[in-house]
Every structure is written in structure tokens, then in C-alpha cells.
């Protein structure tokens, strides 16, 4: 069903593609013959993403294998992309054939499974075992419809500054550092130790909400129970994560930056914080923000049990006129061979256990991070993470919690007041 | 016409000319409407229709992603009246509007007055004041956001030089309003100054000469000749900046360190009404369209009321002929 191509055909068509193709065919991407040679109707598939997913080479490869298919990609900003998708889905017009959906939005969209092609119709059901169970589960509709197939996951680790740890009298070796914080409480306590001898103006972590979200990501249930009811106010684990975060802020461990703000970006360059909760894709972000800090960073395991921040799905809106072709391309782009190629190119971590355990991923080291075996660290985190129920207002609740933590960091409210306003905000959402 | 009627008095011709006359009458009556029709047709499609449709949506509990919805009457409005975040947004909008519009128009008047006199390289300055206007709004917002950064912003760096501690511009209520007003004023002063300048140039020199004979100096001329003479332009700019100021969105939106929620800071300290509308409709995962539509209508009414009050106030500026 999926296109079939031999390496030779590719080389003939696009010489530059040769290397990638060989890799892909070599890693076992389904190669058969028929589709490649038959003259199909010319079809243009549109694909709408936020940020660069690293698909460019894969498009060329797919087009070469499927004469008549051309792929047109459009990339928008994260927030704009998702609100546009909501508009297209609501009006049944304007969506691309393939739409990327980030994990923060997947619950909202999968609640409308009739708006998307059930990929089970195109044989995706048989591929279930490829994915991490929680990754697979998160994109299922209420009746088991497959709304999207997983691309990457944002497994968490802790990126830390070796030089700052040394100055504060903490160990710098990544094994020893990982052992400093088996739990989040130990992490916050390490922060207290750090703060005692920390260089002036340097804090232990960047932002309270990043630490808080990492803690929330590990508990189950968190914001929603199994029946999809919001349980923020009654869940002791949420309050525990909040209290621990507040303890860290009170001990002066937080720089109080909002993630992705200008000050946060500058904070990387200036080394204003010693640790940051680090999904796989953050490695690229740090390198981009602060190239001069090369070698000063290292990566340790998260406290607790793994974690996840970000990662996406590819879905085919029901309004697509080329649903079959689009579904085929989705399967191609999320195939093990493709995800493996993307990992090598961009560092986006595959969402498939077989790949996570493979040599290609686990053997990968990153020189920017003191040659840390990042593939192995992130893969461990992804494999350890337990699935969690996420609900439609997950994103809005997260915004409310980040604001609440910021209010305390900015000394505008006491933790107690801010917490009660957070609960009020959450109540208004549900 | 009269020639032809006299030359061809046959019944057919008379009938024909009667038809023509009638057509002409119709033409004279109808065609003006046809000429202005394109505007009104477009306005109906892109102005009136969305307005009415929004009014209809505001009476429902429509969610963008949910295909089922029902008519709920004025429930959205009554909820809105008790929504403290809405009133907070109204307060922020008015606050930022006052802080930006008043200095903006005063600066613009003064700048226009200066540019209206004979300066060296006058064209250079006249073009120069318009430069902020042609700068991309997004670029302006991003750069000002950096300037007003807490830890590493240029404004705080300068304040440090004179011994003032870092101000967390974004976190405070008044401080964030000041930062936003600076951004808005910087961008719009030139535009308003240019409008004033154009109006000032149409003031006859005789008035200035006469007032000079009466002993009026520059400042008195400005107050008693210039300002009354350009009153219509002032009314226009006040109303336009009122509408713009109350719809304020892009600058505060881009000023947020975290944009997806559109909450205007951690304590909603600079969330404007338009931002609150956006938060409900598209921010994060809410997609609460009915409620957002109700906010849109309240914003519309607010603008209408304030524009009218403005108009009444500005009308009291003494007119030139009184």
C-alpha cells in the first residue's frame, strides 16, 4: 500500500536524496513495487505544521516513490496554527490535508472525532504496537477512533550547568547529579544547598512553572480523572506539586522567568540559572540561544519517573478531499524509518519504543552537552513515563497555573491567595 | 434635447423621447445610488453582516469545536456583567487608552505646530515623524518588549545608571500600562501630527497676521488661532484614536512573555477587552464563541458611548467663528 521504491530509482530521480533513501530503505521501511510505477491521478497534498518538523527530505523521498503526488508544506506559529485549525474544523473549510496537533491541544480536537478521518479505516489500527502506549492512547476518540498518529515526544530530563554546580559545591558528574534527586523533594532540597553557595544572581532553576509542570506530568490522575471530570481542587497530588514549587520559590531557587520570554532567553546566555527542565527538543533551543555555553551543560535524569513536555500528532481532517492519500503520507511520516531519520536530523525524539531502544537513538551523544548520552537519557525518560488522562481544557488550566506561579514569583500575591485564584480560574473553565 | 423634441413631433418620436425622459429621470435618481453602492454592498457583507451574526452568536452557547449548540438568550451578557475579569479588562483598556491617547495627541499638536513654521530641512522632519508609522507593528512591539525587559532591558539599564532599581515593567499594573502607552504613543504621534499639519496649512495667514497685530505671541496664536481652526481635525483624531485605543490588542498581546493564553500578564494587569475576547475565542483551548461574541458587542457599545461623549466634549473647543 505504501509506495515502493528502490534505492536506485531514487538516485536516478534525485541524486542528492541518495543518502537518506539508503538509510530509510536500510532501516526497513516497507518497500514494495506496485504503487511506484502505476500512473496515479496527480494529487497535491497540503500539510500544515507549527515549526519545522524536519520533513523536507522525507517529502522528496515520498514524491519520488509516488509519481503524481506533490506535497506542499505550510508552517505557522504554534498558537496561530492551532487556532486556525480550530476555525477550519469548525467551518469545515480551509484545513490542510494533514494537520499537526500538539499534545496540549489533542484532547480538545479528539473530542470531535467526526471532524477527523478515523485512521483505523486506513489500516493504522494494526500499527498500534509501534507507539508508546500513552502516546497512542492520547489521540484516541471516545469510541476508539484514531484521530492522529504520534510524531515525536518531548521526554524530560534535567539540563544543568556543570560550571555553576561546581561553584556551588555540588557534584558535576551526571550519574552523581542524577542521584542527588531521586524525588522532586530531593530536587528542591538540592536547590537549597545550591543557593547557599551559589554565585551572586544565579538561581537553581529558571521558572517555577517549568518545575511544577514537570511534577504534574508524572502524577496520574492529574487535572482530569478517568471519566474526564476536572479534579484540580480535590486532587492532593496537584496541591502537593504546588506546595513543593512554592517551597522552592520561597527558598529563592527560582529565577522567575516565564518560559520563552526575552529574559528567559537572555538568562541562558548569562547563565542566570543552573538547571532547566529539558525536553529533547530543548537541546536545540539552548544551543540556539546560547551557543557560547557549549560544553558547560550536561544532562541528568529527572526526579521521579520520566516526564513529557510537548510532542505532536499528525491528523487528517474529515474535510480533506484526498483522505486516502493523506492517510498514507501520515503513515509514511510517522513510520519508524522516518522518525529515526528525523531524530538524526533534528533531535526530535521518536515516540516509538522500538526506536527508543535502538542503537541509533540510545547510542546518540551530544557534544554540546559534554557528550552526554542524550539518546539514552531521553529514551529512558520516555519509557518510564506512565500514561496520564488529559482533558480538553488541559492547555487553559496550564496557562492558569503558570500565571498563578508567576504571581507568587513576582511577589504580587501570597501562595495561598494565588492558589485560590487558580482554583477559581479552573472552575470558570469547566 | 429641446432641439430634437422640436424637430421630430411625430407620435413615435414623442413617445420615444418620453421614454428617454423617463429613463433620464430614473438615471438621475438611481445612478447616484449605484455609484455609492459598491461601498455599501461591501460594507453590508463585511461590516453589517458580521455585526449581526456576532449578535446572534452572542445569544447562543456556541463553542467553536462543538457542533451542537443552543439558544440561551441573554445569559452570556448577564454572566459578563458579573465577570470580574471583564471589568478588569475594561479598566485596563480605559487606563491604557487615557495614558496613551492624551499625551499622543498633545505631542502631535505641538510637533505639528513646530513643523508648520519655517524650519530648515522641513521635508526631512516631516517625513521623519511618519517613520514609526511605516514600521511593522510586530517589530515595534517586539523591540519595545525587549527595551522594557525586567532583568536585561535597556530602560532598566538606564534607570540603574541614575540609581533606580530594576522595575519589573511587565509584572506591575501601572508600569505595564506605561510601557504600552510609550509604545503606542511612539507609533502614532507622527500620524496624528501629519493630520494636524495638513489642517494647519489650510489656515489663512491673515489670521496669524491679524493676531500678531493684536499682539499675540506664538503660544497665544497657537491656543486662539490654530487650535480652534483645526477643530474638525482634532475631533476626527480623537474619535479615531478612541476607537483604536479601545480596540487595543496587538501591542499588549505581543508584550506578553507567554502569548498562547492571552491573559495579559500573570495577574491580568494589562489584559484589554479585545485580548479577553481573544482569550475566550481562541486563546488556549477555550473556543467559547458565544461568550466572546457577547464581549465583542459590549466592546462595540463601549466604543459608541465613549466616542459620543468625546464628541460632546470636543465640540466645546471654541470654534473659530464664534
Image (spheres, rainbow, N blue to C red):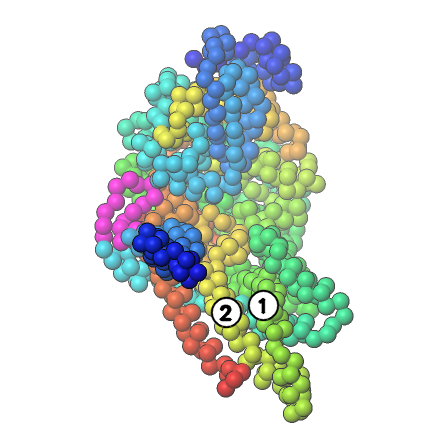
Could you tell me residue A331's position as x and y percent? 44, 21
Nearer the observer, B262 or A164 = B262
Q: Residue at x 37, y 31 (%)?
A: A319
User: Viewed as shown, does residue A133 lie left or right of B127?
Assistant: left
Quadrant of the rendering where the N terminus of chain A is positioned = top left
Q: Which residue carries the number 1 mark?
A: B195
Residue in the picture at 46% in, 78% down = B315
| Residue with the most extreme right position | B120
Q: Badge 2: few (under 14), some or many (20 or more) residues near its Cα, within 10 Å?
A: some
Tell me the magenta residue range.
B57-72
Q: Position of residue A33 (x, y in %)?
A: 49, 7
B194 w.r.t. A371: above or below: below
Rendered view: B211 above or below B115? below
Left/right placement of residue A132 relative to residue B149 reads left
Q: Residues within 10 Å of mark 1 (few under 14, many from 20)?
A: some
Determine whether label 1 and label 2 are within 8 Å by CB: yes
Q: Are marks 1 and 2 on the same chain?
A: yes
Q: Position of residue A164 (x, y in %)?
A: 65, 44
Chain name for mark 2: B
Magenta part mainly helix, strand or loop? loop
The earlier-in-sequence mark between 1 and 2 is 1
**Which residue, given by chain and number where applicable, does mark 2 sit on?**
B236
Picture coordinates of residue B68 (x, y %)?
26, 41
Whether residue A48 is in magenta: the answer is no
Residue A5 visible in image:
yes
Left or right? Give the position of A180 relative to A368. Answer: left
Q: What separation in Å lies between label 1 and label 2 (alpha carbons)? A: 9 Å
Establish if A335 lies above or below B242: above
| Residue A353 in view in this figure | no
SS at mark 2? helix
Amino acid at each position: 500500500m505504501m509506495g515502493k521504491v528502490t534505492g536506485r530509482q531514487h538516485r536516478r530521480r534525485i541524486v542528492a536524496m541518495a543518502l537518506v533513501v539508503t538509510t530509510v530503505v536500510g532501516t526497513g521501511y516497507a518497500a514494495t513495487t506496485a504503487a511506484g510505477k502505476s500512473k496515479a491521478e496527480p494529487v497535491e497534498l497540503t500539510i500544515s505544521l507549527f515549526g519545522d518538523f524536519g520533513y523536507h527530505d522525507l517529502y522528496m523521498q515520498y514524491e519520488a516513490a509516488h509519481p503524481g503526488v506533490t506535497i506542499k508544506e505550510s508552517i505557522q506559529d504554534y498558537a496561530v496554527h492551532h487556532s486556525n485549525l480550530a476555525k477550519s474544523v469548525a467551518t469545515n473549510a480551509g484545513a490542510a490535508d494533514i494537520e499537526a496537533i500538539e499534545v496540549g491541544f489533542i484532547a480538545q480536537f479528539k473530542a470531535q472525532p467526526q471532524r477527523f478521518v478515523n485512521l483505523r479505516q486506513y489500516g493504522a489500527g494494526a500499527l498500534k504496537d509501534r507507539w508508546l502506549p500513552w502516546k497512542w492512547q492520547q489521540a484516541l476518540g471516545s469510541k476508539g477512533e484514531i484521530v492522529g498518529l504520534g510524531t515525536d515526544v518531548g521526554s524530560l530530563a534535567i539540563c544543568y550547568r556543570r560550571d555553576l554546580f561546581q561553584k556551588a559545591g555540588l557534584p558535576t558528574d551526571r550519574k552523581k547529579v542524577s542521584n542527588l534527586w531521586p524525588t522532586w523533594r530531593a530536587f528542591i532540597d538540592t536547590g537549597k544547598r545550591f543557593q547557599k553557595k551559589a554565585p551572586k544572581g544565579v538561581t537553581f532553576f529558571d521558572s517555577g512553572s517549568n518545575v511544577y509542570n514537570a511534577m504534574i506530568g508524572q502524577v496520574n490522575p492529574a487535572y482530569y480523572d478517568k471519566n474526564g471530570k476536572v479534579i484540580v481542587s480535590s486532587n492532593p497530588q496537584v496541591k502537593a506539586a504546588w506546595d513543593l514549587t512554592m517551597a522552592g520559590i520561597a527558598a529563592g531557587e527560582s529565577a522567575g522567568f516565564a518560559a520563552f520570554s526575552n529574559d528567559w532567553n537572555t538568562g541562558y546566555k548569562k547563565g542566570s540559572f543552573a538547571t532547566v527542565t529539558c525536553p529533547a527538543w530543548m537541546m536545540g533551543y539552548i544551543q540556539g540561544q546560547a551557543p557560547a555555553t557549549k560544553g558547560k551543560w550536561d544532562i541528568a535524569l529527572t526526579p521521579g519517573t520520566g516526564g513529557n513536555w510537548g510532542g505532536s500528532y499528525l491528523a487528517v481532517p474529515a474535510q480533506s478531499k484526498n483522505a486516502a492519500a493523506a492517510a498514507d503520507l501520515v503513515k509514511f511520516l510517522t513510520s519508524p524509518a522516518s522518525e529515526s531519520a528525523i531524530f538524526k536530523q533534528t533531535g526530535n525524539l521518536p515516540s516509538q519504543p522500538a526506536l527508543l531502544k535502538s542503537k541509533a537513538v540510545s547510542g546518540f551523544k551530544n557534544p554540546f552537552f559534554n557528550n552526554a548520552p542524550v539518546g539514552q537519557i531521553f529514551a529512558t525518560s520516555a519509557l518510564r513515563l506512565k500514561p496520564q488522562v488529559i482533558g480538553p481544557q488541559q492547555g487553559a488550566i496550564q496557562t492558569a497555573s503558570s500565571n498563578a506561579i508567576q504571581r507568587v514569583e513576582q511577589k504580587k500575591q501570597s501562595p495561598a491567595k494565588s492558589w485560590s485564584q487558580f482554583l477559581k480560574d479552573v472552575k470558570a473553565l469547566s | 434635447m429641446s432641439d430634437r423634441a422640436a424637430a421630430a413631433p411625430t407620435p413615435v418620436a414623442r413617445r420615444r423621447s418620453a421614454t428617454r425622459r423617463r429613463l433620464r429621470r430614473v438615471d438621475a435618481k438611481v445612478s447616484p445610488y449605484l455609484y455609492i453602492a459598491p461601498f455599501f454592498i461591501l460594507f453590508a457583507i463585511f461590516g453589517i453582516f458580521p455585526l449581526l451574526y456576532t449578535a446572534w452568536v452572542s445569544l447562543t452557547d456556541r463553542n467553536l469545536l462543538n457542533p451542537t449548540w443552543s439558544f440561551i438568550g441573554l445569559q452570556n451578557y448577564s454572566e459578563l456583567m458579573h465577570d470580574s475579569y471583564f471589568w478588569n479588562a475594561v479598566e485596563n483598556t480605559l487606563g491604557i487608552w487615557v495614558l496613551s491617547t492624551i499625551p499622543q495627541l498633545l505631542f502631535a499638536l505641538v510637533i505639528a505646530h513646530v513643523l508648520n513654521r519655517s524650519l530648515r530641512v522641513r521635508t526631512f522632519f516631516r517625513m521623519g515623524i511618519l517613520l514609526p508609522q511605516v514600521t511593522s507593528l510586530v517589530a515595534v512591539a517586539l523591540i519595545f518588549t525587549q527595551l522594557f525587559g525586567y532583568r536585561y532591558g535597556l530602560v532598566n539599564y538606564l534607570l540603574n545608571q541614575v540609581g533606580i532599581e530594576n522595575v519589573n515593567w511587565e509584572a506591575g499594573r501601572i508600569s505595564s500600562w506605561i510601557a504600552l502607552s510609550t509604545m503606542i504613543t511612539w507609533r502614532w504621534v507622527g500620524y496624528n501630527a501629519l493630520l494636524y499639519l495638513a489642517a494647519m496649512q489650510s489656515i489663512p495667514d491673515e489670521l496669524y497676521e491679524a493676531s500678531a497685530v493684536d499682539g499675540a505671541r506664538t503660544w497665544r496664536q497657537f491656543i486662539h488661532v490654530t487650535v480652534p481652526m483645526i477643530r474638525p481635525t482634532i475631533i476626527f483624531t480623537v474619535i479615531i484614536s478612541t476607537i483604536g485605543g479601545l480596540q487595543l490588542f496587538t501591542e499588549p498581546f505581543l508584550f506578553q512573555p507567554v502569548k498562547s493564553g492571552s491573559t495579559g500578564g500573570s495577574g491580568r494587569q494589562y489584559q484589554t477587552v479585545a485580548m479577553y475576547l481573544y482569550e475566550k475565542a481562541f486563546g488556549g483551548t477555550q473556543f467559547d464563541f458565544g461568550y466572546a461574541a457577547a464581549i465583542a458587542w459590549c466592546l462595540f457599545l463601549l466604543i459608541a458611548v465613549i466616542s459620543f461623549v468625546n464628541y460632546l466634549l470636543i465640540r466645546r473647543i471654541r470654534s473659530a467663528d464664534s
